[in-house]
Amino acid sequence: MNKMKVGIIGCGNISAAYMKNIPGYAHLELYACADIDVSRAQARAEEFAIPHAYTVEQLLGDPLVDIVINLTIPAVHAEVCIQILEAGKHAYVEKPLAVTREEGQQILEVAKRKGLLIGSAPDTFLGGGIQTCVKLIEDGWIGTPIAATAFMMWKGHEHWHPDPEFYYAKGGGPMFDMGPYYLTALVALLGPIRRVTGSTAISFPERTISSEKKRGQKIKVDTPTHVTGLIDFHSGAIATMITSFDIMGGTRLPNIEIYGSHGSLRVPDPNTFGGQVMIRKNGSDWEPIPFSHGYKDPNRGLGVAAMAQALITGDSSAHRANGELAYHVLEAMHGFHDASDAGQHYMMKSSCEKPAALNPQTVL
C-alpha cells in the first residue's frame, strides 16, 4: 500500500499526539521531525522512533518528505506554511490556519499556485461522534435543521496554564482559542456560513494567575473574553454561539445542539473525537444513539490521513479538513469581532464546501 512520508515542524507538547497517531494510519509514514531547538527534535525522534531529527531547513530540503505538519505557534503559522509550500510539499497546520485573514488568503494563494494541498486542524469533526451526527441529519432523523446552539463557557486559562498570557493578548481570547472546534463542527453539520453578528466584552480587564509557575502575577486583558454571536447559514439554519472565559461558576449548557423540524440532536464536545450522541423526538426523553462511525478515541492526525488518501486516490473530496474550510472558519471568527465593533452584521466573503460525510466503513 502506498504511503506518504510525513515530517513534523515543531516538537512541543502537542507534537506527541501526532507522533503517536501518525504511524497508525494506512497511508502515512512518520519520517522526520524538526524544531528550531534541534535537541527537542532529537528527543522526540528518540522517543517515537522517528528516523530523522532535522533542522527546519534540512526537513524542507529533504526531497523524500511529502507532507509537513506545522505545529509552530499561531503567530508564525502562515510564515511556516508558506515556507513548506514553497519547498514543494503539502502542508497541514494546527488551528488556526493563520492569525489574520490576509495571511490565510496568502496561504491559499501559494498552495493554488504550487498545485499543493493545504489542510488545517481541527479534524475532530471526522471522529465517530460528529460523523454519527452528520449521518443522522443526512438520514432525516430530525427533519430539516432549523436552528442550533453552541456553548464554550468557563473561567479561563490563568487557573491552570503555566503561561496563560497569550490567551488574553490580541489574537487570543475564547473565540480564537476554541472557536475553530465549534465553528468547524457547525459547518460540517449545517454547511457554510452566510453572515455573522456579534457582541463582545472584556468582563475583567485584569486577570490574576493562580497556576503555580506564575502565581500572583497580573495579566492585562487586550482582547474580548466573552463573545456572543449569531450565525446565519446558507442552508437557512440560524445558530447562537457563545465562547467565554468569564463564566466563573460554570454551566450545564450542552456543547452543541441542532434543532430540526422533527426532533433535536445533542452533539458531543467538538474538542473530542468521541463523546455521546443524544436525540429527542416527539416530546420523548433524550435517548443515546450508538456510533455509526469509528475513530471515537483521540485520533489527532485524522485530517492528515484524509489528505494523504486524497493524494493517493485522486479523490479531492477525501481532503475534508482543507484550507478553504479553515479559512472560512477564520473569517467567521474575525467577523464576530468586526460585527461587534461596527454594530452591524458581517457578511461573509468566503465560502466552502460542506465536508463530504465519511463512509462508516472508511479506514484512514
Image (spheres, rainbow, N blue to C red):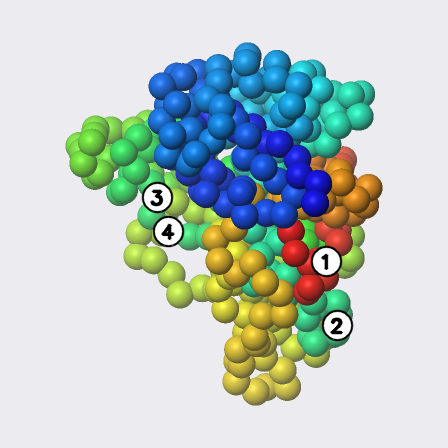
Q: Residue at x 62, y 65 (%)?
A: 293
Q: Which residue is mark 2?
A: 139
Quarter of the rendering occupied by the N terminus: top right
Q: Which structural element holds mark 3? A: loop
The three-letter code of the residue at mark 2 reads Asp
* Residue of label 1: 357
Tell me if residue 321 comes above or below residue 285 in the rendering. Answer: above
The alpha-carbon separation of the residues under discs 2 and 1 comes to 12 Å
**Whether residue 302 is situated above or below residue 79 in the rendered picture:** below
Q: Position of residue 77 (x, y in %)?
A: 55, 25
**Which mark is nearer the camera, 1 or 3?**
1
Circle 2: is it few (<14), some (14-19), or many (20+) Cα within 10 Å? Answer: few
Is the C-beta separation of discs 4 and 1 under 8 Å?
no
* Residue at which label 4 appears: 154
Q: Of callouts 4 and 1, which one flags the residue occurring earlier in the amino acid sequence?
A: 4
Q: Secondary structure at mark 2?
A: loop
